[in-house]
Image (cartoon, rainbow, N blue to C red):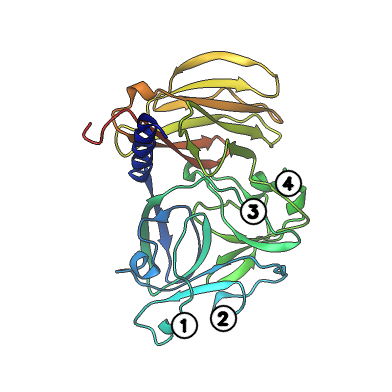
Amino acid sequence: MKANSLLTLVVLLAALSARSEVTRTQTIALQKGWNSVFLQVSPAHRDPSSVFASTPIEVVATYFALEKAVQYIQDPGSIGWNKEGWSVWYASNRADAFLSSLHAVHGNRAFLIFSKQDFTWVVNGTVAFAPTRWKNDSFNFVGFGLDDSALPTFDQFFAPSVAHQPYRIYRLVNNQWTQVADPVRTTMRSGEACWIYCKGASDYQGPLRAAVQVGQGIDFGTASEGWVSFANQSTYPMNIRVEAVANDGGLPLSYTIRGITQGSMLPVSAPLPASYQLQQLEAGDSTSFWLKLRRESMTSQTQSSLLKITTDNGIQLWVPVTGSRTDLTSAQ
């Protein structure tokens, strides 16, 4: 390998290893007793003893789907945590702490949490774009990204999905799993996990179907372009807003809108503002939101942003975006 190529590789690896990821904060209101929580961020220190230090949280459990389907729901207080599929953590002051089997807390997971008192749990962590993976012909312990300012009902969220009807949805109420009797009028909650039955195979993600080019976000690497695709799976027009969020200066990006359904490319290419409203997406239509990295405007070897994607029907998604520039030294 030539010296110049070797130097470029070393600089690139150094930039990647020094990557600074943008974090976001999730706030979850816990009640005394059992809580069913959908955690969307991954804490920097993922050991449960660190995550739950200085909190009234005593027991935390999560379910890893097995080959065997879940056909019925047990109340948290009656679950034997040593059963297959469950991983649990007990606070160190408990006599059963030595039985802990949960060793790391990751985002995009549903958790059962027992708290000794009402408590506002504030979690700061990194974000990964990770679509829900449904186990067919089974209850699934899941939660979704939702906008607190425009929360949908269960019916508004799941109406386009045949696999989730007739609805069999259970939420935790006063330490008991309770079936949602009126999905048409019952509102979903941000940060809540429920048991939801999926009949047959499904990859349904909600009224808005979003996807990234590869992986769990957009990492430009040596490329200059990346994209997020959107599909409106509802029967109503949808308004989509993209906001760029960063802990510091973020990434210098430009955007282009390309229509997939119409097979056309709109003549729009400009620096991405802090908040951008896409053209209204009609029912059944899809589009791609293309991003271009303005690498020449980067001031550090590695910079990151988060794309906060919200819709007028209550969906909220987060996509991490990272870019690197190898011609800068660490001193710049």
Q: 10 Å neighbourhood of mark 4: few (<14), some, or many (≥20)?
A: some
Q: Residue at x 60, y 32 (%)?
A: 229
Q: Which residue is mark 2?
A: 82
Asked if the residue under mark 4 is in contact with the one under mark 2, i.e. CB atoms within 8 Å, the reply is: no
- Residue 10 in sight from this viewpoint: yes
Q: CA distance from mark 2 to mark 1?
A: 9 Å
Left or right: 307 as drawn, with respect to 151 = left
Q: Which one is nearer the viewer's eye here, 238 or 289?
A: 289
Amino acid on which disc 3 is placed: Arg
Quadrant of the image containing the N terminus: top left
Q: Which residue is mark 4?
A: 161
Q: 10 Å neighbourhood of mark 3: few (<14), some, or many (≥20)?
A: some
Please tell me in which quadrant of the rendered image residue 18 appears.
Answer: top left
Please tell me in which quadrant of the rendered image residue 326 appears.
Answer: top left
Q: Position of residue 126 (x, y in %)?
A: 41, 49
Q: Which one is nearer the viewer's eye here, 179 or 328?
A: 328
Q: 10 Å neighbourhood of mark 1: few (<14), some, or many (≥20)?
A: few
Q: Residue at x 42, y 28 (%)?
A: 275
Q: CA distance from mark 2 to mark 3?
A: 24 Å
Q: Which one is nearer the viewer's eye here, 180 or 169?
A: 169
Q: Which residue is mark 1?
A: 99
Which mark is in front, 4 or 1? 1
Q: In the rendered view, tell whether residue 71 sits above or below residue 330.
A: below
Q: Earlier in the sequence, mark 2 or mark 3?
A: 2
Q: Which residue is mark 3?
A: 133
